[in-house]
Image: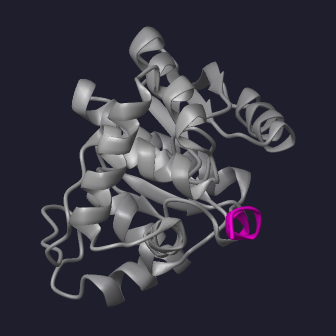
Amino acid sequence: MKPITVLIAEDHTIVREGLRQMLSGEKDLQVVGEALDGRLAVALSRKLSPDVVLMDIAMPLLNGLEATRQILKANPAQRVLVLSAHCDDAYLQSAVEAGAKGFLLKQSSTHELCDGIRAVNQGKTFFSSTVARRLEQLYPRRSDREGVVTKDAVKLTSREMETLQLIAEGKANKEIASDLGIGIKTVEKHREHLMKKLNLRDTAGITRYAISAGIIESSVQLTVV
């Protein structure tokens, strides 16, 4: 039987190595690639076409939520299982809206992790018990998480989301332009558009929004405020 291929997207080396070691003991699971940031996760998912992407949320250059959106836009057949240290409502809601099929906490056991990978590979949803309880409170009208109707949200383009994250991470326009391979004036235009859409006035407001939306972890705020 062909093993389920898995791409691990996690920026912490020790965690990434631990996940690979955990999965290596399962005969039906095969790690085919590792990504240390969201942008690389998107590139490797297109190159390697893994069955399941095991996705961290808070990663540099491109967070796991936007990476999930881009991966599924390019290949809706791929499955994304989010693995996060946080169970905040913003993270859960954003992950579901991005199209993730499951959400596990990093405190989960090896058994639960492997079961989650197998479940989402079959097209099922899989949430750890703690996460499932939070989702029931967020979406009381639906129990299967499919076709969730959420409150109206401001829609940013993928490029605006990338720009927003890099601004929140404390990068200057010149650095953002270099990271994204675009001109400084284009960065300024993206910044202007996203601030107008979100009704924000300054970088501090962008950072607060990024944290509240689960785009970056609150610890990042210490480096940019």
Q: In this rendering, is residue 21 above or below 213?
A: above
Q: Main secondary structure of the magenta part?
A: helix
Is 56 magenta? The answer is: no
Q: Which residues are magenta?
A: 219-225
Residue at 83 percent across and 36 percent down: it is 13
| Image location (x, y in percent) of residue 149 | 12, 72
| Image location (x, y in percent) of residue 114 | 60, 44
One can see residue 95 in this view: yes
Residue at 25 percent across and 82 percent down: it is 139
Would residue 26 appear left or right of 89 to someone viewing this image? right
One can see residue 160 in this view: no
| Image location (x, y in percent) of residue 184 | 44, 31
Most extreme residue toward the front is 185
Would residue 86 appear left or right of 181 to someone viewing this image? right
Would residue 149 appear left or right of 116 to someone viewing this image? left
Most extreme residue toward the top is 47
Q: In this rendering, is residue 86 above or below 46?
A: below
- Give the quarter of the image for residue 172: top right
Residue at 50 percent across and 51 percent down: it is 165
Structure colour scheme: one colour
Is 222 magenta? The answer is: yes
